[in-house]
Image (cartoon, rainbow, N blue to C red):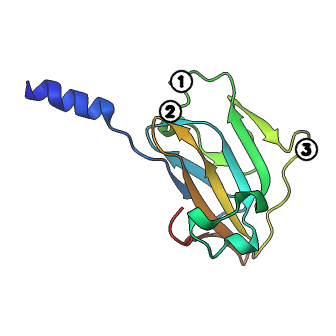
Amino acid sequence: MMILFVALSIACYEEDMSISIDHKLPPTFRLSGSGNLAFFGVREVALENQKLIPSQRDGDKDVVLWEIWPNGLSSDEKIIYRLPSITYGSVPTGFVQKVPQTSAPPDLVEGKIYEAGGPASNANGGFVWFTIKHGRIKKVDAPGGN
């Protein structure tokens, strides 16, 4: 009976998405979590949103710079911890770029604040804030968490 309980507990466990980021330009993101990624994007955080907790932010003021969606991947292949690392501007195999539609995304600019991540199903999605300082990527703490 105990073995069945442990097996069911493990099978039902959901791990929210978390994102690690390297310090190189362009940044590379490594995703972990048990859900299925809906899409991944990078947006420039509007100045008026940079000091607000998530429930107060107006996401329509942020600028979507780059957005990629899993395309043709099975549900099993969309599990976040199985996805490859994602480098800004480089579309991984099994993904399609939706923003911008016909060109490479714009270069990231020193001093601006960016948010990278996306929503997921079967667990919460996740985001990371970052900026560029002296030509290197630096993680930024978002007010009230991401």
Is 14 left, or right, of 118 in this rendering?
Answer: left
Name the residue at 46% across, 35% down: 122
Q: Position of residue 123 (x, y in %)?
A: 45, 40
Q: Earlier in the sequence, mark 3 or mark 1?
A: 1
Residue denoted by label 3: 103
Q: Are marks 2 and 1 in contact (CB under 8 Å)?
A: yes
Identify which amino acid the numbered label 1 is placed on. Answer: Ser
Name the residue at 87% across, 39% down: 101
Identify which amino acid the numbered label 3 is placed on. Answer: Ser
Q: Quadrant of residue 42?
A: bottom right
Q: Residues within 10 Å of mark 2 (few under 14, many from 20)?
A: many
Which residue is situated farthest in the right direction here? 102
**Disc 3 versus disc 1: nearer the observer:** 1
Which element is circle 3 on? loop
Name the residue at 53% across, 24% down: 75
Q: Which mark is residue 63?
A: none
Residue denoted by label 2: 79
Residue denoted by label 1: 75
Name the residue at 80% across, 38% down: 98
Image: 64 above or below 70: below
Marks 3/1: CA distance?
Answer: 28 Å
User: Is any atom of residue 124 visible in this view?
Assistant: yes
